Image (tube, grey):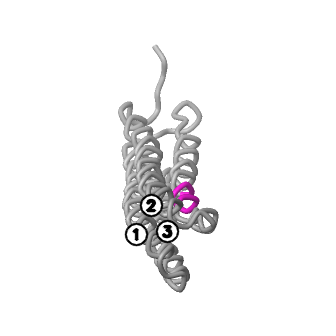
Amino acid sequence: MVSFSGDETAPFFGFLGAAAALVFSCMGAAYGTAKSGVGVASMGVMRPELVMKSIVPVVMAGVLGIYGLIIAVIISTGINPKAKPYYLFDGYAHLSSGLACGLAGLSAGMAIGVVGDAGVRANAQQPKLFVGMILILIFAEALALYGLIVGIILSSRAGQSRAE
């Protein structure tokens, strides 16, 4: 019989939060990359000299997966029930942390994909639109950054469920 301190089902919710952060953020990154990549490929037929300049949305979408990875690592290192009691409060804190970061990354990836696709095609026809496209992409990326910040704050709440 292994002695376990804390709630036995709590790590399930913690690991679910780590998985949610990574999976949803990577789904957003994949969608943003694919959608923007289609726009870059389409634009490259008309104006091949602008391909490298138009790769910005693809790079910005790829960063979203890194945000999910950061939160997943933070959460998974905080789950060690043999070293320290892990209660349901901690599991729920980690779950909410992962969902906040993951779903923010998913929504940001969708926004980056749509803006990136339309933006690089429009930039091929009117180069003055480049700065506006970059600004819109920055604001879309900021949505994921908000999720990362909230995820870090929520994850830091784990371990504060009981006075020790």
Chain-order first, disc 2 or disc 3: 2
Q: Position of residue 112 (x, y in %)?
A: 44, 65
Judged by its main secondary structure, the magenta piece is helix
Which stretch is magenta? 58-63
Pointers 2 and 1 in contact (C-beta within 8 Å)? yes
Residue hosting label 3: 141
Q: Tell which tag, 3 or 1, sits nearer the viewer.
A: 1
Which residue position holds label 2? 39
Cα–Cα gap, marks 3 and 1: 16 Å
Q: Earlier in the sequence, mark 2 or mark 1?
A: 2
Q: Residue at x 52, y 51 (%)?
A: 65
Residue under circle 1? 118
From mark 2 to mark 3, how far is it between C-alphas? 18 Å
Q: What is the x, y in percent for residue 155? A: 49, 55
- Residue positioned 59% across, 34% down in the render: 83
User: Which residue is at the front of the view, 56 or 163?
Assistant: 56
